[in-house]
Amino acid sequence: MNILLTAPYHEKGQKQLEDTLGKVINRPWKDNGRAFNSQELIALLTETRADALITEHDEVSREVIEAFPELQFIGVCRGTPSNVSLETARLHGIPVFHTPARNAQAVAELFLATVIDMLRFVFEGSAWLKGGGWGAGAHTSYLQFKGNELAGKTIGMVGFGAVGQRIAEMVENFPCKIIFFDPYLQNFDPKYSKVSLDEVFAAADIVSIHLPVTPDTIGMIDQKLISLMKKDAIFVNTARASVVVREDLCFALENKLIRGAILDVFDHEPPDATDNRIINLPNVLATPHIAGATDEVEDHHVEILNHKILNWFAEEKVKLDKI
């Protein structure tokens, strides 16, 4: 088997695949400067005579899969395989593996860092200090940048998958109370409270969004929900921008209906004029879609994906042996 590998993958992970499945041909998208588009991917699959593909951000479209309908598998080093035409893969019986939770720790850590930064006015205080704002008054900074502790706050999660649960594990001993809305989650630790969507927005001091993009979630977070938030509450979105009606969030922030927002995702990346209007508000802490950007995330996705792929082949071999 020839496996075309365009995702970042450490040598140990590549060797594990080669020892079990066959030749790994490494053509990383990072060397290309951007993800491969459909035509480029078709050319690479043709050149390498690939029998399988492991990708990260490349465009694995219907055209790509129809050009190679006998791929043995497609591996996607992402939390959701949103860059793959899953329907086409299903039609051709190609299994698609992905890596949920690969970035759970990274996103949870950035959540913790940025929420505390906002509660404690870290960036404002640092800018004031660097700008020579500290004059003769010894207690000026103590009074001007007196913030709040995370301890004792109620954190409300909209969606309670791997990232939300990792955040909960990290903050529960501050202590923080954890409430969540997730209609699909039936089994969970009873120390966390499953509540309605309205209650998350009305009761939480920090509302954190952890939703995938589906027809049901696009525009789900709107003025009706945002208006339920406490005036001193913080809105956090490290998931997907399209689940929030940005004009409604912008209105709440500009009119100081809530304390502020921490945003890592935007409707347009790079941002358009409306995104920048939100980004540049004084009560917004914005980061450029880096919540999952750590070196360790790449180690995690190799471990998760290799485990899935190798287990699947082992199970298929058992099935064949029984025939």
Image: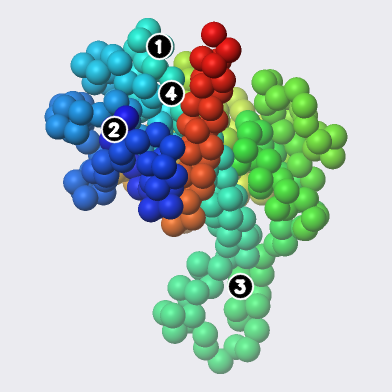
- Label 4 SS: strand
Report which residue position mark 1 lands on: 93
Residue sticking out furthest to the right:
190
Q: Say what amino acid the circle numbered 1 marks.
A: Gly
Q: Closer to the camera, 84 or 286?
A: 84
Pointer 4 local density, CA inside 10 Å: few below 14, some 14–19, many at least 20: some
Report which residue position mark 2 lands on: 2
Q: Distance between the residues labelled 2 and 4?
A: 17 Å
Lower sequence index among marks 2 and 1: 2
Lower sequence index among marks 3 and 1: 1
Lower sequence index among marks 2 and 4: 2
Residue 272 appears left or right of 166: left
Report which residue position mark 4 lands on: 96
Q: Residue at x 68, y 41 (%)?
A: 165
Lower sequence index among marks 3 and 4: 4
Report which residue position mark 3 lands on: 144
Q: How far apart are marks 2 and 1 (CA)?
A: 19 Å
Q: Distance between the residues labelled 3 and 1?
A: 62 Å
Q: Say what amino acid the circle numbered 4 marks.
A: Val
Pointer 3 local density, CA inside 10 Å: few below 14, some 14–19, many at least 20: few
Pointer 2 local density, CA inside 10 Å: few below 14, some 14–19, many at least 20: some
Q: Residue at x 50, y 33 (%)?
A: 310
